[in-house]
Amino acid sequence: MTDTREPARPVRFRGGGFAPRPVRLAGPAVFLVLVAAWEAGARTGVISPLVLPAPSEAIGALVELWVSGELWEHLAASLSRLLLGWVSGTVLGGLIGLAIGLFSLVRAGLAPLVAALFPIPKIALLPLFIIWFGIGEESKVALILFGTLFPTVIFTYGGVDNVDRTLIRMGQSFGLGWFSIVRKIILPGALPAILSGMRVSSAIAIILIVAAELIAAERGIGAYIQIAGSLFATDQLIAGVALLSVFGLTVNWLIARAERLLLRWRP
Amino acid sequence: MTDTREPARPVRFRGGGFAPRPVRLAGPAVFLVLVAAWEAGARTGVISPLVLPAPSEAIGALVELWVSGELWEHLAASLSRLLLGWVSGTVLGGLIGLAIGLFSLVRAGLAPLVAALFPIPKIALLPLFIIWFGIGEESKVALILFGTLFPTVIFTYGGVDNVDRTLIRMGQSFGLGWFSIVRKIILPGALPAILSGMRVSSAIAIILIVAAELIAAERGIGAYIQIAGSLFATDQLIAGVALLSVFGLTVNWLIARAERLLLRWRP
Amino acid sequence: AQDKVRLGALRFTSHSGAFVAFEKGYFEEEGLDVEFHFFQAAAPMAVAIASGDIDYGVTAISGGLINLAGKGAIKVIGGALVEEIGVDGQKILVSNQAWDDGVTTPADLAGRSFGITQTGSSFHYMISQIAAQEGFALSEVSLKPLQKVGVIIGALKSGQIDGWTIVPHIAKALAGGGAVKIIGNVADYIDTYQVTTIFTSSANASDKRDLTERFLRAYSKGIADFNANMVDRTEGEAGLESTTRLIHRYVYTSRPYEKAAPSIRNGSMRLQPGARLNLASVRHQLEWFKSEGLVDEEITIEQLVDTSYVEIDD
Amino acid sequence: MQLRIEGLSHRYGDVAVLDNVCLVVDAGRIACIVGPSGCGKSTLLRLVGGLEEPGSGRILQVGEPPKRSLNPLTYIFQDFALLPWRTVAGNVSLVLEDHGLTRRDREAIIGDVLERTRLAEFRDAFPRQLSGGMKQRVAIARALAVRPAVLLMDEPLSALDSQTRELMMDDLVDLWKRENLTGIYVTHNLHEAVRLGHRIVVMSRRPGRILETVEIDSPVWDRDASDPALETTRRHLWTAMRDEARAVDLELTGD
Amino acid sequence: MQLRIEGLSHRYGDVAVLDNVCLVVDAGRIACIVGPSGCGKSTLLRLVGGLEEPGSGRILQVGEPPKRSLNPLTYIFQDFALLPWRTVAGNVSLVLEDHGLTRRDREAIIGDVLERTRLAEFRDAFPRQLSGGMKQRVAIARALAVRPAVLLMDEPLSALDSQTRELMMDDLVDLWKRENLTGIYVTHNLHEAVRLGHRIVVMSRRPGRILETVEIDSPVWDRDASDPALETTRRHLWTAMRDEARAVDLELTGD
Ligand SMILES: Nc1ncnc2c1ncn2[C@@H]1O[C@H](COP(=O)(O)OP(=O)(O)OP(=O)(O)O)[C@@H](O)[C@H]1O
Ligand SMILES: Nc1ncnc2c1ncn2[C@@H]1O[C@H](COP(=O)(O)OP(=O)(O)OP(=O)(O)O)[C@@H](O)[C@H]1O
Ligand SMILES: [Mg+2]
Ligand SMILES: [Mg+2]
């Protein structure tokens, strides 16, 4: 049956790919290489201390902060502001975004308002924020809240817009209630977009902690960075920034976990 | 055939909804009502001028700016920085995001780096930005570039992750080249997420114009707001902020147009 | 050919020495082609001098400035604004609420909140000196860093902070409007206060002596002109008017002249003739920064100041 | 529950899809709809299911649905419409959750319908892990779970292998018999149509009109595939459809 | 081009899907695969198409594909896999764009295949505007456009009405005849299988093994649906499959 004179070769595999798999240790490796190069550059004088202090100096500043016991106070102060501001901004933004995604009237009325208010620089409004919210915790939390509110609104309604309409029609055809459809079809469908958006909004929240702690803050990583910047104490500046990076990495790791758990249905 | 004694009623319509339709004029109406209420509040003294100046005063400041001819200079200066920074941040961020979405190794190496660098507050690094990029246009553009780069990376790879894998397999089964698959299947599939992300990154760019123009800027809306803020000239402050809002609305409108054009295939 | 000089400035009346020198051609006479670079805050200006983006600048002595000097990047070469007893200088203010609450003298500030822009700013220094003189510890005052003058004004008006110090024209404008109360003068607590100084990069100070001397000469002429017209008013109304107009090209530019003129006039304070420098004051400030742990213990007055350019009061 | 469709017309933008369709489906009887691809069968079913509003005409339901029916008018979608984030059991559970059943009742129903659609083994699989036929069976299981009074089926068996299809057909026949179900059944398979329908409706090409209606009065549970009467009907329908399809063909190649 | 599948096994995680499948499809001949839902037919086809890597065993293509074939091994997906952002014409165009054809050549091919699938009228419609059968026809048109040497078809006609299906089958037969096409055809329809296949392979339930292979030697273009020999084969296959399905059924209800 087989014509053996003709050339036989295996069918070429052309599928696969386009599905990134975790590569262990690549992340830490990149970090290590970068920091090592930076340290080497600083030690050999290629990078002048004016341009960037050596990582070892920044670590020195961190150790100092830790020994003095101020580290925990700074961390605790910033974390509580971050959490309060980010969580409330995300919840509120999620609700508004959902409303914009669901109701024509809300969309027509609020979407342009969001587009108009989002690009207002919160730092520029600091003078007014203080009048509105005082110089206590309120104004700091409010700043983070407003900073994360608008992007969350936009992600959420973007995600809702992208939910497969056939699935919604299916829910309706089974007489599911409006709330059931929103909770069981629209929210899970928008979840990938919302989680991806939360990566961004959490980073924005962390960025804003510095702006928030410009206002009458004695404690907090933002205040620490601020003082370091105004004193041009670059080692402390980098140490503070590194702490914020660690915040960012932690949140990112948590969101990645959540994605793995909540989006495991994705092919 | 028909049993007329039994009650007959039309089948209840239970589809529809979940597809917001444009409601004309609702957006402008909301704006008008808000501004009118604000003006009324300011005139009757319900809103003290300390808390918020009347919109008419802000308009007065705008007119002053216009008459003095500075308006155009400010606008031109900010717009060119914005465009340069945002476009380059978006292009670069899009490319990096795509690479993270496509290659396991890039993802493993860069995704944590992005997560670590994104939450670094650009304002805190202003002193270093000056050392790195000088006080010319470079540092201003760089600030906006870095501010928009990271969110764009995250949206883009979020969008790429969400592209339907069957479509990619289909492309492969027809022997489409790697570039064709990326260009014709992955990019269009990620487009809704990318456009939604561009709304956010453009707003971030506009927000950052104020921080950017902290650095040795004579002209620009950000510089104008900055001066107004430091003098507590709230009318000018609001006028400047309103100009940024108009920027935001314009970009938002452009993106909405692009969405209507590029995503008209969506049900 | 003219030597190019990049000069950093803030759009404040206290920088008018440079504006006058430029407009009247004093820089040109010295063969200097001056190019202004305007900043929104003093801190970036110091950094820009360290990075070599600009050559000269004028600003208050701050922790950042001292630290940059400690890194060998910049040097103070002359003085500008100074406060002395008997000259109308910075005022101590309290909010109306605090006043009603019995804060009527600087001594009452103990246990109160006090607005400053940043830790290590001149405001921080001033309250520390007030506290020292009145005999209470600085830690008894709750310091509120609020970054910007405008923000502090807002906080003071709305009674969220109790006290502040600020230049007289702003203080008087606020008090005149009934928004705050003036309870004293900073000059009473600090015996001759060198508020702002002229500074440049260490490289300029050591390697470009000729250029720097020419710059300071022209600047001094500008100062003399400014003092004569705006402070002493020796040229009468005409000189005041023409100099105000000249300054208005740089300060309050977004306001029409009629609105800007009073602010410019009231804000004009005497600048040090010949850019003299009060080294004693500078040294005192340096020691204070060290004692607060804001700057490196090792930094010496020699690292901070190059005394070879102008007359020194010590 | 009787269904009455009166003078139904519908269009999408410029495209007229249905043109004056009139049809009565008596309680406990099944109408099978056949017609060329794109003639508006799915649209008709969506309209009857209340998922779209008719352009003109009306659809009436006569009589009360039985009390125990959770969703009287139930739809089986042509493209399955499974929630990708729910497992097989979760997809069935979805349609039971809004009816105040206890957890145990729900579990019992889910277990029962998955058993009947031979999916018990896959109750915890996600849709992406299922084959085409299995997805279709999940869609059927989900529809059975709500004990419909009227079942609207859009090619419910097209992706199934012939044997599974045979078993599912037996299941449906059983359902008719037990539950006195009313149904509209869209299919391309004339064998299926003559096997399951009491009334077979042939639709014209777009815009869909009713070309012909054939009644088969024998009870479905008594029908035999080899019955010559059924075969005659099938051949008759076949001719009717072929003529229509030829007309489409000529029209298209004619210009 | 001949296809040789040798000792192919595959599993997804814990689930064994294919078990030692051996099959040879000679050039110009069509193998039809039938088997219960979920037995691994689509998986087999994906493996042959090079879209997945086999767990063990190998798949060989023997001989060179004809020069004019743009994509020798072409796959028709069970779920159509149309790009929602391209029109009908755009979806076909997609697979032609990487082959250096001129615009005119492309347009000619697109026009031709849309005509053959009776979609010319819908060339500018987006997939969301199409009925299920029309989507399937777009998928077929797209596959025809690249002039395949081996066509892998996963229930390509299941969503089509019987008349369109008949016409498409004629089209396929024509294609075999004209282009000397090799094919693997997965179907649930035994009529289709005996009509189109030279070799009919019955697969067992999961993990899919080959249960039985039936050869039909008459050329497909000479076959007549009423040929009693074909009917006998069909009945024979039917019995084989029913036994397998019964086994599945017993297994499931047994525990
Ligand atoms: N991505 C996957 N992950 C896990 N299991 C899978 C995956 N894809 C398919 N399967 C399993 O493999 C088995 C075979 O699937 P396949 O799609 O090949 O079946 P099939 O024979 O085509 O069925 P049908 O006729 O219903 O389309 C099924 O039991 C299915 O659950
Ligand atoms: N959302 C829509 N917008 C525009 N046209 C549509 C839309 N949905 C369906 N159509 C058109 O309506 C016609 C009927 O579609 P329908 O899905 O009802 O056909 P069908 O009879 O179910 O066909 P099939 O047997 O192929 O599933 C088709 O020509 C289709 O192009
Ligand atoms: Mg249909
Ligand atoms: Mg399959």
Image: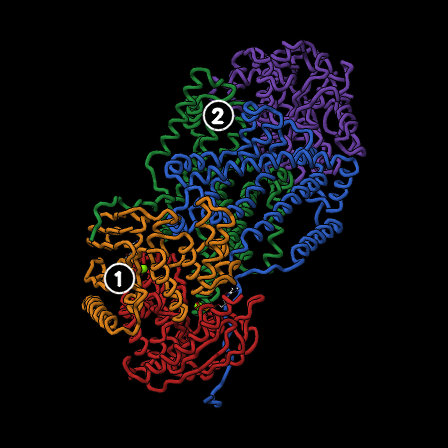
Chain colours: A blue, B green, C purple, D orange, E red
Residue drawn where x is 36% and y is 73% of the image: E189
The number of callouts visible is 2
| Type of the residue with mark 2 | Gln
Distance from mark 1 CB to nearest ligand 2 atom below 8 Å:
no
Q: Please state the quadrant of the image where ligand 3 appears.
A: bottom left
Location of the N terminus of chain A (image quadrant): bottom left
Q: Check disc 2 and report the residue beneath it.
A: B236
Question: Neighbour class for label 2 at 10 Å: few (<14), some, many (≥20)?
Answer: many
What distance separates the C-alpha of mark 2 from that of mark 1?
Answer: 79 Å
Mark 2 element type: helix
Q: Is residue B220 left or right of residue C308?
A: left
Q: Is residue C3 left or right of residue A239?
A: left
- Ligand 2 neighbours mark 2 (CB distance < 8 Å): no
Rendered image: mark on residue D198: 1
Q: Is residue A235 above or below residue C156?
A: below
What's the residue at 58%, 12% (across, down)? C175
Give the image location of residue B120, x and y in percent. Answer: 62, 42
B80 up-or-down from A133: above or below: below
Q: Confirm whether circles 2 and 1 share one chain.
A: no
**Amino acid identity at mark 1:** His
Q: Which of these two is toward me, A27 or B149?
A: A27
Q: Position of residue D55 (x, y in %)?
A: 24, 48
- Quick check: can you spot residue E104? no
